[in-house]
Image (cartoon, rainbow, N blue to C red):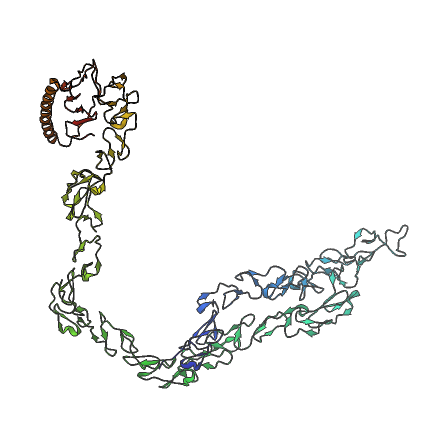
């Protein structure tokens, strides 16, 4: 059965909050046990007792620092001084002129009297007496407390303070009895005094030579010096007040003041003693006032009676202290706390009548009898409610559970890890073993053995009581797990028998680690090292092969040429523009250029095409981006940079610069006039020395020589081609020989190699290395071939 205590209010405790708390003086009540937690300044089972005198605070553990009978506040330790003392710790007497509780009362002492700092009682100086030192010593006495008798004779008065004698007229000295005859000597011519003897004020005697000693405005007799006192004064020199109980002229009137009041010696006005008031001081002070004229307020507490004179408190039974604020100490009771308590077993004693208030669990007149079995609490009025218990606590009713049981009613089995009576003992079973709640015997968890389950199963066994044999592990690092029987796989393996390799991308113990290989690299299932894919290197295969290397681990060296890049995976060369072949060693084929030789050249008229950029290099006589244009009129040659020199509207060959003369002109630049002959072609260069016969013998010889020359040229051409193939790709260079000089009507050619002048057919040849052969056919059109067999036009 579950019970809730925490919801009880401050006045109840126990199961279902059914018990009423007995705590007093603002003490807190434990909601489970009902025990009282005392507030500062209190003690006792119910916190009904104040701290013992001299102690204060929480648990009454602090010692008071107060002096001179002061009381200490049982809560804060603050000192409450006894009458007559002041200061933080009451270490000082009341200042002069004050007395009583808190030094609030003013001293009534007169004539230099000093009052007691506690009671205010006056200590009179010599010569004075009375409650407030207002009365001089009676006639015939003097000194402290008027205890000394005057020695004066013959009616002499003694000083009530010092006892010095003041002699009457006719006597002198301290106690002499010499008589003096009185005469009125200041009257002239008289042997006997007639009339009055009057002396100046303040003097007396026969010759008015003596000074009067009268005080308080009294008159002095002119002869004897005797003083006539005013109302309220008395004594030889009128320096005393009226005797106690009298006042007025000659102190003849009787005072009416009562209860020890002082009577004014002049008017008879009453000055009441402490504790009384009224004109004649016949009215006592009220219940809560005291002192002179009942002007002070009593400070007595707890119904204590207050003295009307000095305010001293008369405490009731069970209280003590200056203001009756301190309860009787533990173990005492009655008036002035002078009775002894006989209560036993922590019982509280009523400080008023001594009656014992028994603590829970006890009963009897003196609380010396324990509660009978089955009962507990205050007056043994509660019944025990326990299940598996050996009775209950007589004070709290707490059940004394048998071994293996716990709970408020001992109806709950011990929690895991506890055993014994009230489950008060901790189990010493290790490794998750449980113990018997009755005797603490250990029941080991699977995988453990021994009295305290401190050892694991022997190698090869596992489970409950280590009774099961391990399975046949393959790639294992030791015996199977002693609890589960699972194989302890080596890194790189998993499965119930450690017979499976880690899946791709995993490695290590239990295949728990994730591979870090990138770029298709494979991971070692044991240690996670990467086997990189060809073309990659690095711990995680994140780095490509350095330039110039390829293949697995970048082992192979690239053989690419002409700036080609090598594929790091298979070593394949990636040729730059204009190159081809396995290792990029070959130029693009003719008419192609660019990357992978994929672009077709657009050059015309036999122009060369750059294998990298496709840029055209024009032949002689042509221009334009694709060499598609002949040289503009007036220019010829390579790059059309040479200017024609033909004149008289002659046309200029765009390749050679040869001039083709208009009819009627001749010469290299067509700057000469020519004869007009019908049989000649108008564009044929003629010689004026030529005969009219066309079929002369010279012509036949010329033809033969021409054939021989052609044969020689063919032989030279074949030889030149072979040389060119031996030289490789050297490009032929072309030079032009337009400079011909005419010395007569015959043509004349200056240049290198073999030349011949033929006067038939008007043909001209000049042959040499890197030169062109030109001829003028009968139709007037020039034809030429280079020695490299390249067609120019």
Identify the residue shown where x is 12% and y is 67%.
459
As displayed, is residue 783 above or below residue 210? Answer: above
In the image, 88 versus 161, the foreground residue is 88
How many callouts does the rendering have?
Answer: 0
**Residue 145 in the image, given as x and y percentages of width and height:** 65, 64
In the picture provided, is 110 more to the left or to the right than 20?
right
As displayed, is residue 110 above or below residue 201? Answer: below
**Residue 659 in the image, given as x and y percentages of width and height:** 25, 22
In the image, 463 versus 395, the foreground residue is 463
In the picture provided, is 709 more to the left or to the right than 452?
left
Image quarter (top left, top right, bottom left or bottom right) of the N terminus: bottom left
Image quarter (top left, top right, bottom left or bottom right) of the C terminus: top left
Q: Quadrant of residue 193?
A: bottom right
Q: Quadrant of residue 460?
A: bottom left
In the image, 405 versus 752, the foreground residue is 752
As displayed, is residue 317 above or below residue 747? Answer: below
In the picture provided, is 187 more to the left or to the right than 11?
right
In the image, 393 versus 329, the foreground residue is 393
Residue 602 in view here:
yes
**Residue 469 in the image, given as x and y percentages of width and height:** 12, 71
Q: Quadrant of residue 194?
A: bottom right
Residue 147 in view here:
no
**Residue 345 in the image, given as x and y percentages of width and height:** 40, 79
């Amino acid at each position: 059965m579950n019970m809730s205590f925490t919801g009880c209010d401050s006045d109840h405790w126990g199961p279902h909050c059914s018990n009423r708390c007995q705590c007093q003086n603002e003490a807190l009540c434990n909601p489970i046990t009902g025990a009282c937690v005392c507030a500062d300044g209190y003690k006792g089972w119910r916190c009904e007792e104040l701290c013992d005198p001299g102690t204060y605070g929480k648990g009454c553990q602090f010692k008071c620092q107060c002096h001179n009978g002061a009381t200490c506040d049982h809560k804060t330790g603050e000192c409450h001084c006894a009458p007559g003392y002041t200061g933080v710790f009451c270490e000082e007497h009341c200042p002069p002129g004050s007395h009583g509780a808190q030094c609030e009362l003013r001293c009534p002492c007169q004539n230099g009297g000093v009052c007691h700092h506690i009671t205010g009682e006056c200590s009179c100086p010599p010569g004075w007496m009375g409650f407030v030192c207002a009365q001089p010593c009676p006639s015939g006495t003097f000194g402290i407390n008027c205890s000394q008798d005057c020695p004066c004779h013959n009616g002499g008065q003694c000083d009530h303070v010092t006892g010095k004698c003041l002699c009457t007229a006719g006597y002198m000295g301290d106690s002499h009895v010499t008589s003096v005859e009185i005469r009125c000597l200041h009257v002239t011519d008289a042997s006997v005094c007639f009339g009055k003897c009057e002396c100046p004020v303040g003097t007396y005697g026969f010759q008015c030579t003596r000074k009067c000693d009268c005080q308080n405005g009294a008159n002095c007799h002119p002869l004897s010096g005797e003083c006539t006192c005013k109302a309220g004064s008395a004594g030889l020199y009128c320096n005393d007040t009226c005797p106690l109980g009298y006042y007025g002229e000659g102190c003849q009137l009787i005072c009416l003041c009562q209860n020890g009041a002082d009577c004014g010696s002049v008017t008879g006005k009453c000055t009441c003693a402490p504790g009384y008031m009224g004109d004649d001081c016949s009215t006592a002070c009220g219940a809560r006032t005291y002192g002179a004229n009942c002007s002070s307020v009593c400070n007595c507490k707890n119904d204590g009676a207050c003295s009307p004179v000095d305010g001293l408190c008369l405490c009731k039974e069970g209280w003590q202290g200056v203001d009756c604020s301190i309860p009787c100490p533990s173990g005492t009771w009655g008036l002035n706390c002078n009775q002894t308590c006989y209560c036993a077993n922590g019982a509280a004693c009523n400080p008023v009548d001594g009656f014992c208030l028994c603590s829970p669990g006890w009963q009897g007149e003196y609380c010396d009898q324990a509660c009978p079995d089955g009962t507990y609490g205050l007056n043994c009025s509660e019944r025990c409610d326990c299940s598996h218990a050996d009775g209950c606590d007589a004070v709290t009713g707490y059940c004394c559970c048998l071994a293996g049981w716990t709970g408020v009613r001992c109806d709950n089995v011990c929690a895991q890890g506890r055993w014994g009576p009230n489950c008060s003992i901790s189990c010493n079973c290790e490794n998750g073993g449980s113990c018997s709640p009755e005797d603490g015997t250990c029941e080991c968890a699977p995988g453990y053995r021994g009295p305290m389950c401190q050892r694991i199963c022997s190698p090869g066994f596992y489970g409950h009581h280590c009774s099961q044999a391990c399975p046949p592990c393959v790639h294992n690092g030791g015996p199977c797990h002693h609890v589960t029987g699972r194989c302890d796989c080596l890194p790189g393996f998993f499965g119930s028998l450690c017979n499976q390799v880690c899946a791709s991308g995993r490695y290590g113990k239990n295949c728990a680690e994730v591979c870090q290989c990138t770029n298709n690299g494979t991971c070692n299932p044991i240690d996670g090292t990467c086997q990189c894919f060809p073309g990659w290197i690095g711990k995680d295969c994140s780095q490509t092969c350095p330039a110039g290397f390829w293949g697995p681990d970048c082992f192979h060296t690239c053989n690419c040429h002409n700036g080609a890049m090598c594929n790091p995976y298979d070593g394949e060369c990636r040729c730059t523009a204009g190159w081809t072949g396995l290792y990029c060693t070959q130029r693009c084929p003719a008419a192609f250029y660019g990357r992978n030789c994929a672009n077709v050249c657009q050059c015309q008229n036999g122009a060369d095409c750059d294998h990298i950029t496709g840029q055209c290099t024009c032949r002689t006589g042509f221009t334009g981006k694709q060499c598609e244009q002949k040289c503009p009129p007036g220019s010829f040659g390579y790059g059309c940079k040479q200017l024609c020199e033909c004149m008289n509207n002659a046309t200029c060959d765009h390749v050679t610069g040869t001039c083709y003369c208009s009819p009627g002109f001749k010469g290299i630049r067509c700057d000469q006039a020519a004869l007009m002959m019908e049989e000649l072609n108008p564009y044929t260069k003629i010689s004026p020395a030529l005969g009219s016969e066309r079929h002369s013998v010279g012509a036949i010889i010329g033809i033969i020589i021409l054939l021989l020359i052609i044969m020689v040229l063919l032989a030279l051409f074949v030889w030149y081609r072979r040389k060119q193939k031996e030289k490789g790709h050297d490009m032929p260079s072309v030079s032009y020989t337009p400079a011909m000089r005419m010395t007569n009507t015959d043509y004349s050619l200056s240049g290198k190699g073999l030349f011949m002048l033929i006067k038939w057919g008007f043909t001209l040849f000049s042959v040499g290395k890197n030169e062109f052969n030109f001829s003028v056919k009968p139709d007037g059109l020039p034809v030429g071939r280079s020695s490299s067999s390249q067609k120019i036009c």
